[in-house]
Amino acid sequence: MSNNDKIDLYQNIWRKFTDGDDEALSSIYFEFFDILLNFGLKYTSDRFLVEDCIQNLFVSLLKNRQTQKNVINVRFYLSKALRNLMLYEQRKTKKLITVEEHRETDFTITYSIENSLIASETDEIRFHFLKLAIEDLTAHQREILYLKFNCGFNYNQISELMQISVESTRTLVYRTIKSIKDTFGNETHSNLIFFHVFHSFLNLSSD
Amino acid sequence: MRITMEKEFRRYTLDDFFDDPDFCSWARSERPDLDEYYHPLINEHPEQKILFRRAYKLIRLFEDEKITTDLQRKLQLWDVTKSIYRKQNTPARLYRQIFRYAAVFVFLTTIGSLTYYLISSTSQHNNTSLYSKLDFTETKLLLDNGKEINIKTKQSEIVYDQIGNQININNKPVSKVQNTDGTEMNQLVVSFGRQARIILSDQTEVWLNAGSRLVYPTIFEKDKRKVQLQGEAFFKVSKDKTKPFIVETGNSRIKVLGTSFNVKAYPDEKVEETVLVEGSVSLNIGKRLFGKEVLLKPDQRIVISDISNSYTVSKVEVGNYTSWINGLFVFVDEPLSSVLMRISRYYNIKIKWTEDAEPLRISGKLDLKDDFQRVLNALALISDGSYIHENSVVNFKLNN
């Protein structure tokens, strides 16, 4: 099934839900729960917070079903709503904590790509190269590449989600990719290293 | 469409690859149907092979660790979601019904949805409902294999070994845990008038005060160590950065990595209280539903109100809150009623008090090795009150 077929399928289920069929929403819930959980975990390491927010998200969907008839891409719609809820919750907590000065650590976007590779890769060199590739990126840059490469959102969607213009979205993506390339040297000399490095990270056999 | 792309393919730059949604989906393994297209294509254009692979690998770099949730938990969370919605939406739905149907019908649906809500909300908490059936008249250990062991001593010690094979109660081996995979829940119920210390399989030490329950697995899950508490306990959590230790109480979820802290969460008290001795803990107040995250520092105490989930954090002398494990109750500016409740639990006697005793706050120390009459005498003295002990009930009142 191609992506577009899937999008159409979910859109149909979604329409059933807005027409009053709660079962339709439950099938969306079960289909997207893990996708949303993994998405949410990029913004916080607190799984419970993500689960809370997913729950709040679906409660508000049930409450406001009438106003949500024009959803085209369900995955995008849910991701965007979840991101907003999570940022809202985090801002609230942060505010609370600054007032009472409980917390030194700041919220940063944690990419599980770092965690998973650190956890599973025994080879320190691989980890070192990976760090090189991403440590210079800002949270914004990591987020944008994640949204593009992992979630497969287009520029319009990313711009809507991150609330920046489509032009800035494009520029930021190009600039970020360029900065990764630059980490491994310039175009002409980088092929070998670039390859070697990525090969190592991913443990893909070169064919 | 494919044909035009093939024309351009030779001139594709790295960025063109990234802007091609089909290519990106294919690289993410979402479009196996495009294998037939890309495999021959790359053989026809060896000059593009380097860029092609690069683009492919960069996309794959963002492939993340997929965390999955088991179906049971998803179902549970979905039930909670629906019941929250139902709860928030009931009044509006009722009004609509009133206009549409006869009053009798409204009455029936109300009962129906209420019952449904009650059923669905009890089914969410398997473990909690399991232990609410128990009473606190005896100290006992309920094992995951269904076995129940009564413990007679006033102070008892239960020790699990690290692989969860052997349990010692007061230095005597009692049971080989059999026929379970170790993830089933055990419970330690400490009756009124008793205390216990338990060492869990991760070597975390827990002191349980009178009238408390601890629910825990023999072997913890791979990614977390979760226990449930009703009552008061002092935790000395063994360090394991890969597995956070989580204590769930009626009102909050307390998450730590390795630290010691005291939790008081008796269902019959209006507030919950956590005091941090060392390390750091984060509390999720209200648990799942719109929970707030608060971080405690050493020497801080958080008091959470049962009803509103509002809370206050203050700096305290932690020794006062943990001294009970050494047989000493220390009260600093505590309501007399809460002191009487503690004594009632500890000595397993019913205490009633008059309303005017409610707002009075007292400070002091009580040695729990004393018998309860001496303790009550001391209390009567500092609070300017008196008590009568008859028919196994103590009536406490203030002198006017």
Image (cartoon, grey):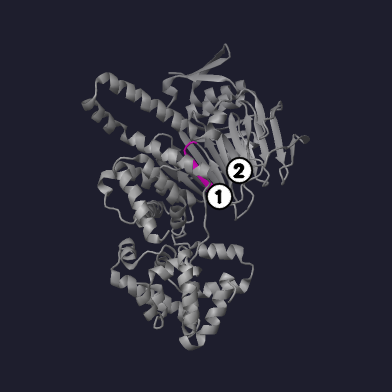
Q: Percent x, y for residue A109?
A: 44, 62
**Which residues fall within the magenta stretch?**
B250-256
Specify the quadrant that holds the C terminus of chain B.
top left
Q: Which mark is residue B306?
A: none
Q: Which mark is residue B235?
A: 2
Q: Amino acid at mark 1?
A: Val
Residue B384 in the magenta stretch? The answer is: no
In the rendered structure, which disc, 1 or 2, sits on the residue that comes first in sequence?
2
* Marks 1 & 2, CB-CB < 8 Å contact: yes
Q: Quadrant of residue B342?
A: top right
Q: Secondary structure at mark 1?
A: strand
Q: Amino acid at mark 2?
A: Phe
* Residue at numbered disc 1: B256
Q: Nearer the viewer, residue B77 or B133?
A: B77
Q: Percent x, y for residue B281?
A: 53, 49
Q: Where B363 sits versus A168, above or below?
A: above
